[in-house]
Amino acid sequence: MPQGIFTRIASFVSNDRFRFAVVTGFALAVGVISWMVMPKGGIDMREDILPSLWNWRAPWVEGTPLFPWATLILMPLRYFTPRDATAIINGLSVVLIALLIKRFDGNALFTIPIILSPIGYRLITTGQTDAIVLAGVLLPAGFDLLFFWKPQVTAHVFWVKGLAQPKTYLISGIALFLFSWLLWGGWLKEVWQFGQTKLIGGWWNFSLWPYSIPIGLLMVYLSLKNKDIGFGIIASPLLFPYVNGPSYVGLLAVVAAKWPKFFGLCSIALLLYLILAVFVPSLNLPRIY
């Protein structure tokens, strides 16, 4: 009898509808809690992203070195307060991370430990848009380029996708570049200079460059060999000299989907570490949150 009960419970928990309901509830909770505990909104949303939407013709001036067509996609946020915009983005980020995990046949419930990790904590408390960028890989070829704002998040995805549909990406890529050149002129130079002078040397740069290059190149090789964009997502932050904390969220999502046991063990180890760091300060463990 007990074995039958446990079997039914396991079957229920593994049901996609159950997982969707849990993730949806968690997303709503994240949005509501974000709104309640951050009356000024996330710092990046407040100080960089929203100002760039008002100055969308030169967003880099406002400290937002995203590829500029991001401002057009994010423009609806301009009509919300930083508090409201942060809550909206955070709730949406939870759903999009779950969909990304599902895209690689993983368990969407792993979204919860990802959000509760230090990387997820940085994503939520800043109001960053990295999960929105990752949503691009879920879109059809060509349309996904509209969400290609941060090369450190998805750049190496396009090796596989481009080789599979070269004409589509050639046409859509040229069209997007010409459109961006007509609207923003020499934006690429502006973004490059901003990155060199204000990003790479910042304390918020958590890039593992150049030590991560061998692993990143291995991931690119596996991506091409297996025609698997998941490895490309892993490779992207490992092969870029500037990566802020939230930009690793795609790497976590793919690892959770592909190697769930490894991810689960790492999540438990991280939880124990955080408990010791918070409740046993005498150990003087490095703060990672």
Image: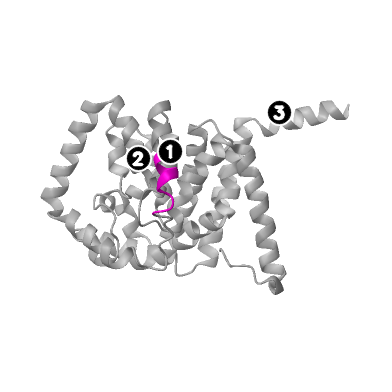
> In the image, is residue 90 above or below residue 134?
below
Q: Earlier in the sequence, mark 1 or mark 3?
A: 3
Q: Earlier in the sequence, mark 3 or mark 2?
A: 3
Marks 2 and 1: CB-CB under 8 Å?
yes
Instruction: Report x, y in % for residue 193.
Output: 22, 62
Q: Which residue is at 70% across, 31% downward?
A: 12
Residue tagged 2: 156
Q: Amino acid at mark 3?
A: Ser
First to last magenta residue range: 210-217
Instruction: Residue 251: say if magenta.
Output: no
Instruction: Residue 211: say if magenta.
Output: yes
Residue tagged 3: 11
Q: Nearer the viewer, residue 286 or 145?
A: 286
Q: Amino acid at mark 1?
A: Met
Q: Which residue is at 41% across, 68% downward?
A: 203
Question: Could you say whether the residue bearing mark 3 is in a helix, strand or loop?
Answer: helix
Q: Residues within 10 Å of mark 1 (few under 14, many from 20)?
A: many
Q: In this orientation, does residue 66 appear?
A: yes
In the rendered image, the residue lying farthest to the right is 1
Q: In this orientation, does residue 81 appear?
A: no
> In the image, is residue 186 above or below residue 36?
above
Mark number, residue 219:
1
Marks 3 and 2: CB-CB under 8 Å?
no
Q: Earlier in the sequence, mark 2 or mark 1?
A: 2
